[in-house]
Image: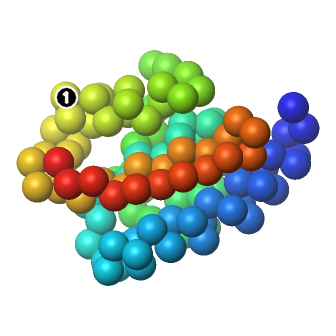
Amino acid sequence: MNGPEIFNFTIDTIPPMLQKVIAKNKLQANDVDYFILHQANKYILEFLISEIGLDTGKCHIDMLNYGNTVSNTIPIALKDSLDQSKINNGDKVLLAGFGVGYSWGSTIITI
């Protein structure tokens, strides 16, 4: 893999994707209770959170317990967030995946 190329793809593609899914759901970013992004690596996550202007307390980052588990990062993060009461019934949670094959996707769910 070409690390710099993947990083550039991520920072060019993911912020607009997140803004688009929020707008498509007729929400503002502050209406979303929690953000679970693909756990690519801590540097990319912190950069995206800063770039988008999100509250770090509303974003899942767990590189100590699991690291990048590829397509499993979002379900694992969702379960851990529920177990740790970071998200609760009725919360709006934005899920965003990106990576392999320069693919990306996102959705907002209500717990």
Residue 37, above or below 85: below
Q: Position of residue 43 (x, y in %)?
A: 66, 44
Q: In the rendered view, does 80 fall on the left or right side of 60?
A: left
Count every numbered label the image shows and give the total. 1
Residue at image position (34%, 58%) is 108
Q: Quadrant of residue 12?
A: bottom right
Q: In the rendered view, does 64 fall on the left or right side of 75?
A: right
Q: Looking at this view, is 111 or 65 the one in front?
A: 111
Can residue 43 be spotted in the picture?
no
Q: Position of residue 55 (x, y in %)?
A: 39, 63
Residue at image position (50%, 73%) is 20
Residue at image position (63%, 36%) is 41
Q: In the rendered view, does 59 fall on the left or right side of 34?
A: right
Q: Position of residue 85 (x, y in %)?
A: 16, 38
Residue identifier under label 1: 83
Residue 27, above or below 77: below
Q: Where's the N terminus, which quadrant?
A: top right
Q: Quadrant of residue 77?
A: top left
Q: In the rendered view, does 34 fall on the left or right side of 1?
A: left
Q: Residue furthest left?
A: 89
Q: Secondary structure at mark 1?
A: helix
Q: How is the image coloured?
A: rainbow
Amino acid carrying label 1: it is Asp
Can residue 5 be spotted in the picture?
yes
Graded by Cα atoms within 10 Å as few (under 14), some (14 to 19) or many (20 or more), the crowding at tag 1 reads: few
Q: Position of residue 42 (x, y in %)?
A: 60, 39
